[in-house]
Amino acid sequence: MEERIYELVADILGKDIEELKSMADEKGLWDSLKRVEIMFALEEEFDIVFEADEIVYMDTMNKILETIGKKAD
Amino acid sequence: MDLQSFIFEQKPTRKQLLDYKAVTEKNFKVCVYRNHSFELVENTISAYLDYAGIGVDFIYSDYDDSLTFLSIPDDADMLILWLDISRYKNDNVADFINARLEYLSEIFTKPVLFVPFGGNVKTENKQAVVYSMEDIQSQLADKMTDLRMEPFTGTKMSASAVSMAARQLGLVYIPALLMPALKAVVVDLDNTLYKGVLGEDGIDGIELTKGHKRLQEKLHQLSQQGYFICVASKNDERDVVEMFEKRTDFPLRKDDLSKLCVSWESKASSIGEIAGYLNIGVDSILFIDDNYGEINAVQSQHPSVHTIRAYDDAELTLKVLDNFPRMRKFIEQKEDSLRKNDIIANEKRRALKEALSGDEYIKSLGMKLTYSINCMENASRVAELANKTNQFIFCYKRYTLPEIEEMMKSEKSCVISVSLSDNLSESGIIGVCCAKLNDDTVEVEECFVSCRALGRGLDECIVLGAIGLACKKLGTAKVRIGFTKGERNLPAEKFLIKNFGTADSVHSGMFSYTMPEELVEITVKEN
């Protein structure tokens, strides 16, 4: 699942997966529209729905992984 | 990529639409004037625009609830007014928006698509086509909005709503407003119009499935709307004629058909024959066939023909046809329903022409020409003809409705629209002359005539008669006639050479013409 999440986000941002992994804790990797496309893609892929506060929270790759991981559990 | 399959069979996800890279060169500029975000629509529209054969550069306004319409690009080909109505709290929002649409008509004369979200606004504005997204609302209900994302997206529309809007705008609305509508649908028979093979299963053995019935109902409806519905089939013609007579359960009747091309010749040659008979370009034809090989063969000979590959499940074929680009007209013209009968009458005219001398032929038809000077109720049809005519047109000026209306109102310009009827059919408005007074000279800015009205011996009367009336209206016989050579306006070029000795880009001189009132009944009307 983690690999698939990186694949989707890297694709949307036009970045290399390994490069993205090296920036897992960095903020500011995406603007608001890219954030939305990422959220939409993840919701579609994993058939989940994020709450509004979760969307605000997920501003780094690690936080995305954490939030989706909790939903999967 | 097979876009028909991608769009209609695969039901692409948002991610797949996002990943799709447009291949069509950006040949149109569309201004998006908005008070909420359109970018999520643009992100997923490319596949649909490519299917329509259109490439669009979207230019965005600032977010503007006040609708000031400042800084609309001069070279925009159309404008999408993308409004979240729920942002307006006052009761008079409809009056406000209609007033702004009126103002917009004065400063922007190209097509306008008004897309209100979160509320309905009725408008009588003639320039604006309204897409209310009621289809999306009825499918999604409360899932049309997604307030979670609004702080980030700048819109209350949900991902599903945005995706559905992208599809409708890309397949239906934007192509309909940027390009002329298609004119003819040519259908195969076996396994397209019904299930089975006529030659093998017989008239009673072929099956009208529920999907095929709905498809035929759609084709019947298109025929009523003025589209030419034709058949191109490799079959025995007697069997086909008998099938239409005996299968009274078929919604599509023989009377709905403008041309039956039933032979063992190639479908490509049938398409060519149909185009010639209807006097239209093959790029105005949509061809529907269940056979890949036939479609490929037709496309290799006629690359500009549009095609639908028919499915075993005719409901899916119908879905493609319902959403096929340039198959929706937003303004029905009286001429649309006249067109089919006119073509049938052309056959009878051809027979008469062969039997009689020139003048006898014209007199036998009892032709009537009505010239209307600045007749505002004709403006819509004039604008439609300006954008559809490709062969007999002087300068390819694709006037919009507001531009035509402006010319009709001004004392320094005029629009002469010409209607034609004879004993066999009524053709409606078939020719137009647009002229402006420049100092002491009438500039004939544009003349265009529908091809189905040409060749009846009245070409000079239609065009020169209209120019003569424009000179009379504007008060001078000194004319300059513009001409721009294009790919397909050879008939117009030949006309100018025949009547003026030249098709130089501008012809100048003193004009006079006497209407042949002994041959044709002439009526002149002025508003």
Image: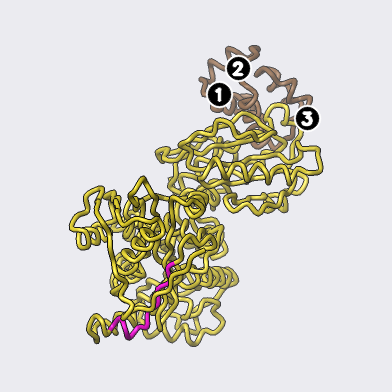
Q: Quadrant of residue B270?
A: bottom left
Chain for numbered disc 1: A
B423 left or right of B44 in image? left
Q: Which residue is mark 2?
A: A29
Do circles 2 and 3 both sit on a common chain?
yes
Q: How many marks?
A: 3
Mark with earlier residue (1, 2) = 1
Classify 10 Å Cα crowding around label 3: few (below 14), some (14-19), many (20 and above). Answer: few
Chain for numbered disc 3: A
The chain painted brown is: A
Q: Which residue is mark 3?
A: A51
Mark with earlier residue (1, 3) = 1
In the foreground, B203 or B499: B499
Q: Which residue is mark 1?
A: A13
In the foreground, B225 or B268: B225
Q: Say whether marks 1 and 2 touch (CB < 8 Å).
A: yes
User: Residue, x 36% and y 69% (percent of image)?
Assistant: B452
